[in-house]
Image: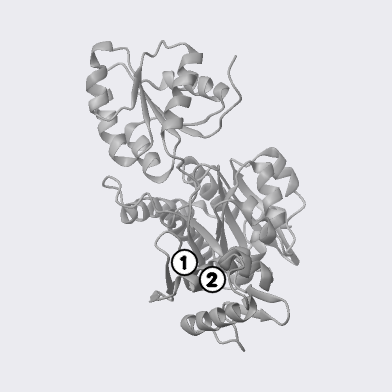
């Protein structure tokens, strides 16, 4: 009897395509989702843009296995399990980068136990929040650095902590005592005065006047709030892997996408092409395009790929333009919004958090679709919890949404709009 399901996503690549479905079924019984790469080129691409709990490579040819490790190992730090019938080649495969080598005839229970062992040894890989961004302001939580409109801003450790806390709670008004407790742990006797001094210094450095706040607003007698919607991004692990950098991602995939969108002929078809492509390419696990109908402010589903039936049923009547939906912010600001874990942002996006629980995709990215007449819809993407979006991923998906929004700015093709 297998233990309780562990969860996570595993990349599977086989020399023979017929071997991978059965292997994926065994992994599914153990609690792991699988993405199957039909070719080594595809496996390299997926390994370079996704964070997998494990990569499983299976094959009979020694030469193919050596090539597979040579392609995949430089692209990812994820553990690699090789299934090979060549017992005498184990040491060679380990030298080439495999973390474990087993026979393809290994009993299912032992295989799942090996997978659990490899995942335990690997450090937790996601989602790992690194960047907070809002209206030209960017915090790097690892480097503890701040940039405003691309220019570095030197903050003291306390100023940084105050700003981080307010951004993490946006757009709520945070009471004085909550900020003081989070930043100082009640260290000062005159806590409110200390907080006021730090906020004033912080505003001066950010170029944020109190009478016309760009970032931080005072609520008299209560506390402070960060007034801009905040996006969250993971560390950009894809940068510098192998020979497929961000420029290659953009050039190759955006060129292909542009060709296919132009050939679509109408917006419905273009929306379907976009969601199928980004899910099929492994850039996300689910995607959807929602659009306003004429004389209707609600967002209605145009096309989706990878979204659960429960999610589709929940949005069947449309999404209203009210607080609590991430789409409300994206359309109002015409800016991309991202959450490393939408469940932890429920104070901002409680309605979106509820919908994405139904989809099983807590990592969320929302891109506004903007034409000449303004924002007409949203292109939304979701990922499973072990693979957050990095800035490079967001750049690619945001550019894809820009293409769709500008190529098809009118309601032409929305048959359901009537």
Q: Which residue is mark 1?
A: 139
Mark number, residue 2 = none
Q: CA distance from mark 2 to mark 1?
A: 9 Å
Q: Quadrant of the N terminus?
A: top right
**How many numbered markers are drawn?**
2
Up-down relation of residue 173 to residue 33 (above or below): below
How is colour applied across the structure in the image? Answer: one colour
**For the residues bearing labels 2 and 1, Cβ distance under 8 angstroms:** yes
Discs 2/1, front: 2
Residue 358 placed where, x, y %?
A: 69, 42
The crowd level at tag 2 (other Cα within 10 Å; few <14, some 14-19, many 20+) is: many
Q: Secondary structure at mark 1?
A: strand
Up-down relation of residue 360 to residue 33 (above or below): below
> Is 140 or 267 nearer to us in this picture?
140
> Is 325 or 331 nearer to us in this picture?
325
Q: Quadrant of the C terminus?
A: bottom right
Q: Residue at x 56, y 87 (%)?
A: 209
Residue 109 placed where, x, y %?
A: 51, 14
Q: Residue at x 32, y 36 (%)?
A: 41
Q: Residue at x 43, y 39 (%)?
A: 123
Residue 318 placed where, x, y %?
A: 74, 55
Residue 319 placed where, x, y %?
A: 73, 57
Q: Is residue 204 visible?
A: yes
């Amino acid at each position: 009897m297998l233990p309780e399901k562990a969860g996570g996503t595993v990349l599977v690549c086989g020399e023979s395509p017929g071997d991978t479905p059965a292997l994926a079924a065994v992994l599914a019984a153990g609690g792991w989702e699988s993405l199957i790469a039909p070719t080594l080129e595809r496996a390299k691409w997926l390994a370079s843009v996704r964070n997998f709990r494990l990569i499983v490579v299976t094959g009979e040819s020694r030469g193919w296995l050596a090539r597979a490790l040579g392609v995949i190992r430089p692209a990812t730090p994820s553990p690699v399990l090789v299934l090979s019938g060549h017992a005498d080649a184990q040491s060679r495969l380990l030298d080439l980068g495999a973390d474990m080598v087993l026979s393809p005839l290994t009993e299912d229970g032992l295989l799942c136990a090996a997978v659990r062992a490899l995942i335990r040894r690997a450090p937790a890989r996601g989602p790992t929040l690194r960047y907070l961004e809002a209206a030209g302001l960017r915090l790097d939580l690892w480097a503890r650095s701040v940039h405003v409109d691309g220019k570095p801003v030197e903050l003291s450790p306390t100023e940084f902590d105050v700003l981080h806390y307010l951004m993490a709670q946006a757009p709520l008004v945070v009471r004085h005592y909550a900020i003081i407790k989070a930043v100082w742990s009640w260290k000062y006797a005159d806590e409110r005065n200390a907080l006021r001094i730090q906020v004033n210094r912080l505003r001066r450095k950010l170029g944020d006047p109190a009478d016309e706040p760009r970032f931080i607003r005072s609520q008299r007698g209560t506390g402070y709030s960060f007034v801009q919607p905040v996006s969250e991004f993971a560390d950009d692990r894809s940068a510098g892997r192998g020979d497929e950098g961000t420029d290659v991602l953009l050039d190759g995939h955006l060129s292909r996408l542009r060709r296919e969108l132009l050939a679509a002929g109408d917006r419905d078809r273009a929306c379907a092409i976009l969601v199928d492509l980004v899910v099929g390419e492994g850039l996300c696990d689910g995607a959807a395009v929602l659009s306003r109908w004429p004389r209707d402010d609600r967002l209605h589903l145009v096309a989706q790929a990878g979204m659960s039936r429960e999610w589709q049923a929940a949005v069947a009547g449309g999404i209203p333009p009210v607080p609590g939906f991430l789409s409300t912010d994206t359309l109002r600001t015409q800016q991309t919004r991202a959450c490393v874990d939408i469940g932890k942002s429920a104070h901002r996006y409680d309605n979106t958090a509820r919908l994405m629980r139904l989809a099983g995709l807590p990592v969320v990215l929302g891109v506004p679709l903007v034409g000449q007449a303004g924002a007409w819809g949203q292109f939304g993407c979701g990922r499973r919890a072990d693979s957050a979006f990095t800035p490079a991923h967001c750049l690619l998906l945001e550019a894809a949404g820009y293409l769709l929004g500008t190529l098809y700015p009118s309601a032409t093709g929305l048959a359901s709009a009537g």
